[in-house]
Amino acid sequence: MEALLILEALVIGLLVVLVAGLLRSHAEILRQLHALGGGEHTTDSFIPPPRRSGLGPSPIANLSGATPEGGRTSVALTGSRGYSLLAFLSTTCTSCQPFWEGLSADFDLSGARPIVVTKDPGEESPGDIARLATRRVTTLMSSEAWDAFKVPATPYFALVDNANASVVGEGSAADWGRVGEMVSRAISDHAHPLHRSTSARKADVDEELMEAGIEPGDRRLYQPPLS
């Protein structure tokens, strides 16, 4: 009888050790998944493009896709002043709900034009999107745009400079307020002289010369300075 009690205690002890090991392994797996960004984005970060080396050109210069009402629309991401903020949202994403609900409210994006981009009608519900979308914000359905920007999870945002269709920031946030703060910071950093490339500064100079009536090859550009 005593031997059976000892054996039972040993078995229980081994089971406790085994369960503890399994729990530690499970916790480690969850930690690694969280570090890799598994599931929906919930971080408040607006970062340079993680899939392209540094700030660079947008993978597409024009957005085109279906509208929730059944039509087609196209939006140019180049050839104009200002910025466009692409908001990649889904009707099945729990973290996206505050953004859908906030489309009718006033939110500050530092002048950036918001554009909601969902996946194609075959992957989303046009009826749900039509119910959630508002006239004040352009909404189009384009899986091509999702693929081009390699959207990792939702909600996700990409800030594009309309002057040359360059991506100046990408990331995720919890609400429009946080997005607005990060857009403001990204625009400020992008406009800072230390962050502007030589080609961008040259383009600014060329534009100012053109406005002054001085075109490339003008003889005034090659006159020696006055002594």
Image (cartoon, grey):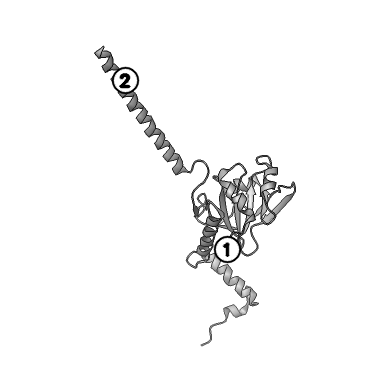
* Residue 24 % position (x, y): 37, 34
- Judged from this view, the residue extending furthest toward the top is 1
**Picture quadrant where residue 223 is located:** bottom right
Say which residue appears at 49% left-offset and 52% top-offset.
44
Q: Quadrant of residue 1?
A: top left
Q: For the view shown, which residue lies furthest in the bottom direction? A: 227
Question: For residue 11, which numbered disc appears in the image?
Answer: 2
Could you tell me the amino acid type at mark 2?
Val
In the visual, does 30 lie left or right of 39?
A: left
Between marks 1 and 2, how big is the CA–CA gap?
65 Å
**Residue at mark 1:** 110
Which residue is rendered at x = 58% and y = 68% of the image?
A: 203
The location of residue 107, given as percent across then percent down, is: 59, 59
Secondary structure of the residue carrying tag 1 is: loop
Kind of residue sitting beneath label 1: Ser
For the point 60% across and 80% down, the residue is: 220
In the image, 32 versus 225, the foreground residue is 32
Kindly identify the residue that appears in the image at 74 percent across and 47 percent down: 69
Relative to 143, does residue 199 appear above or below in the rendering?
below
Q: Evaluate whether residue 150 shows in this view.
A: no
